[in-house]
Image (spheres, helix red, strand yellow):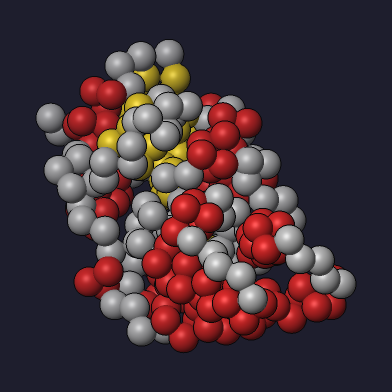
Amino acid sequence: MTTIKACIFDLDGVIVDTAKYHFIAWKALAEELGFVFTVEDNERLKGVSRMASLEILLEIGGLQFSEPEKLAMAEKKNTLYVTYIEEMTPEEILPGVPHFLQELKNNEIKIALGSASKNSPMILERIHLTEMFDAVVDGNSITEAKPNPEVFLKGAEWLGVLPENCVVFEDAIAGIEAARNAGMRCVGIGEPETLGLADFVIPGFDGFTISKFKSAFGDTTIENHIDT
């Protein structure tokens, strides 16, 4: 029987929906380069690092550039993206997230962020959730993108918890694969048809309680006592 001692959360699409801002910024870059970047194309960028996302974008456009040129493009995209997220407020936190995080805190379950976004600390500050996380692993702390498990393994390490005692919350296929590669359980946030590799899938945190979390992992125990 496995004991759950920690939860690791992706940021985009799990805690907040910043995908719309990423899309606007990538779309603007693509238009500048002379091709169309669609909502469907944007799905391929979910859970992927900035430079890896740029490579996908350029592949879609059938374009090639030098490394210095690509670094400049990535910086241009990020500058535009940051202008949007600088205006974020706590109202942009997805429904049910604060309540579930507080329940984890009340039951002394450790909480980490595991995101490829280098802007994660800024976003957490803007939405007033920084203090809820015991560790924040972002794109500034890792060298490998999901589905490589580095971000989640580092989260477990910083929390002082073994990977098998962690549960990851993810909305992207690459993120779920990363959780699996880390030897962790995973809860998908979104559609079961897309996130079938997760242990189970929920549409979001609205109405999702720690009691339901415990029930979903019937063959596990959760550190400390949970009121049901």
Residue 78 visible from this viewpoint: no
Nearest the viewer among 111 and 192 is 192
In the image, is residue 41 above or below residue 7?
below
Q: Is residue 204 left or right of residue 40?
A: left
- Residue 217 visible in the displayed image: yes
Seen at 40% across and 67% down, the residue is: 20
Residue 157 sits above or below residue 49 on the image: above
Q: Position of residue 74 (x, y in %)?
A: 67, 74
Q: Position of residue 152 (x, y in %)?
A: 58, 44
Task: Using the image as rendered, state which of residue 30 and residue 112 is in the foreground.
Answer: 30
Residue shown at 42% from the left, 33% from the top: 195
| Relative side of 100 to 10, left or right | left
Residue 199 placement: quadrant: top left
- Residue at image position (20%, 40%) is 208
Question: Looking at the picture, does residue 198 appear above or below residue 100?
Answer: above
Q: Quadrant of the C terminus?
A: top left
Describe residue 43's horizontal placement relative to residue 64 as left or right. left
The residue that appears at 33% across and 72% down in the rendered structure is 127
Residue 32 in percent (x, y) is at: 62, 81
Residue 101 percent across, percent down from the top left: 29, 51
